[in-house]
Amino acid sequence: YKLLSQGQPVLLFPGGAREVTKRKGEEYQLIWKKETDFVRLATKVNALIIPFAALGADDAYDIAYDADDIMKSPFAPAVKAAITSLSPGADMEESIWPITKDPIFGVPSPVPIPNLNRIYFKFLPAIDTSTEVCNLRDPEECAALYGRVKENIENALVDLKKEREIDPESDLRTRMISQVTEWLPDIGSSSRR
């Protein structure tokens, strides 16, 4: 609140830690809480909301075991105890990070190693809360603005998926081959001279 009220830029992820600790099958889903707090806060300080979508981060890691798998495993009591001792009162749903697969060997890795695929971003038009105000006393009005921001981001994710499908260099291998062939001399034309 303090930074926003001073006009400082703040990067806020409405999904918080839970959106980062996604489960299998939750790729590219916005996992936002029902509370409209970020819209209400932005309105209170007349801040700009600049929605953006990012595509590729959910593909950066292949999940071997998500939080649900971990909590069903024999290790669940130890995991709960460790989280509770490190961060009393922590939300277990947000605190258990998935165990990912090594991208080369496909085996579970204690250290997340990302796949090196391209990440796409799309920034959407800013919403000026000094002119597009949600009445802080009207929960439905704030929910409507919140819903519009969320829907715009979901639509942008659809657009980015289409962009990725037609991108000839969306994966690292293709980009590397393209770069190497640009750097190499054209052997066929130089030998004919």
Image (tube, rainbow, N blue to C red):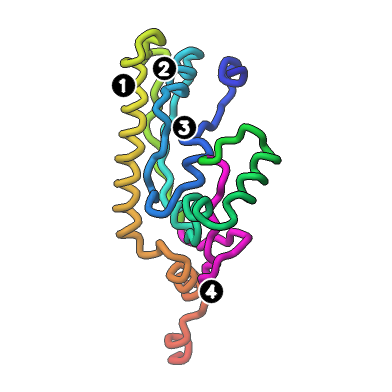
- Closer-to-camera residue (186/76): 76
Which x, y percent locates residue 27? 39, 50
Looking at the image, residue 177 lies above or below residue 119: below
Label 2 belongs to which residue? Answer: 129
Label 1 belongs to which residue? Answer: 144
- Kindly report the distance in space between the C-alpha atoms of the residues bearing marks 4 and 3: 34 Å
Is residue 102 part of the magenta span, yes or no? yes
Q: Main secondary structure of the magenta part?
A: loop
Which x, y percent locates residue 36? 41, 22
Q: Callout 3: few (<14), some (14-19), or many (20+) C-alpha neighbours within 10 Å?
A: some
Which of discs 3 and 2 lies nearer the camera? The answer is 3
- Kindly report the distance in space between the C-alpha atoms of the residues bearing marks 3 and 2: 17 Å
Q: At 58% across and 18% down in the image, what residue appears?
A: 1
Q: Find out whether the residues at labels 2 and 4 contact each other: C-beta distance under 8 Å.
A: no
- Kindly report the distance in space between the C-alpha atoms of the residues bearing marks 2 and 4: 49 Å
- Kindly report the distance in space between the C-alpha atoms of the residues bearing marks 1 and 3: 15 Å
**Reading the chain from its start, which is encountered first: label 1 or label 2?**
2
**Reading the chain from its start, which is encountered first: label 3 or label 2?**
3
Q: Find out whether the residues at labels 3 and 2 contact each other: C-beta distance under 8 Å.
A: no
Q: Find out whether the residues at labels 1 and 2 contact each other: C-beta distance under 8 Å.
A: no
Looking at the image, residue 21 lies above or below residue 168: above
- Kindly report the distance in space between the C-alpha atoms of the residues bearing marks 1 and 2: 13 Å
Amino acid type, callout 1: Ala
**Reading the chain from its start, which is encountered first: label 1 or label 3?**
3
- So how many labels did they put on this image? 4
- Say the numbered circle drawn on residue 14: 3
